[in-house]
Amino acid sequence: MFDVGLLELAMIALVAVVVLGPDRLPDLARQAAQLLHRARGLAHNARDELRNELGPEYSDLQLRDLDPRAIVRKHITEAMADFDREQARKPTLPEGQVPPYDVEAT
């Protein structure tokens, strides 16, 4: 997700120890973990409430299904597949045959 390597994590940890000090770092890490846990709980509650409000036909709803990028990607993929199927159904000329040419049309 963030594409952070081991070297970057080590540098962040070193800066955190220097800036915050080794005494305050465990408390801040604990507070960050609690904040993350609360945020995750709020997200799960919001998802469950949305599912309950929408009814049983949306019981398998995932929040990532509501991502606009995923929706656009899905529709573009379907449109490209339809176009490919349409192109495959079009008749093609045999090898060496020239398409008809109308002098008066051009």
Image (cartoon, rainbow, N blue to C red):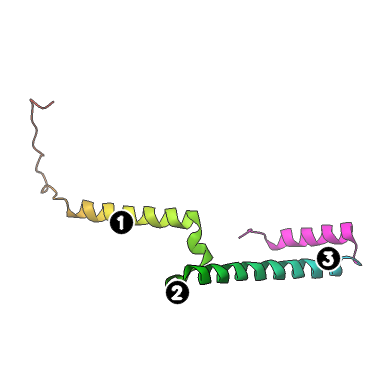
Magenta stretch in the rendered image: 1-22
- Position of residue 105 measured from the top left corner of the image (x, y, whole percent): 10, 27
**Amino acid of disc 2:** Pro
Asked if residue 68 lies left or right of residue 89, the reply is right
- Quadrant of the image occupied by residue 75: bottom left
Q: Earlier in the sequence, mark 3 or mark 1?
A: 3
- Position of residue 59 measured from the top left corner of the image (x, y, whole percent): 47, 73
Say what secondary structure mark 1 lies in: helix
Asked if residue 21 lies left or right of residue 52, the reply is right
At a point 14% along the width and 49% down the height, the residue shown is 92
At a point 48% along the width and 68% down the height, the residue shown is 54
Cα distance in 3D space between marks 2 and 3? 42 Å
Q: Where is 12 relative to 36, above or below?
A: above
Q: How many residues crowd mark 2 within 10 Å: few (<14), some (14–19), many (20+)?
A: few
**Which numbered marker is on residue 28?**
3
**Which numbered marker is on residue 81?**
1
At a point 10% along the width and 49% down the height, the residue shown is 94
Say what secondary structure mark 2 lies in: helix
Say what secondary structure mark 3 lies in: helix
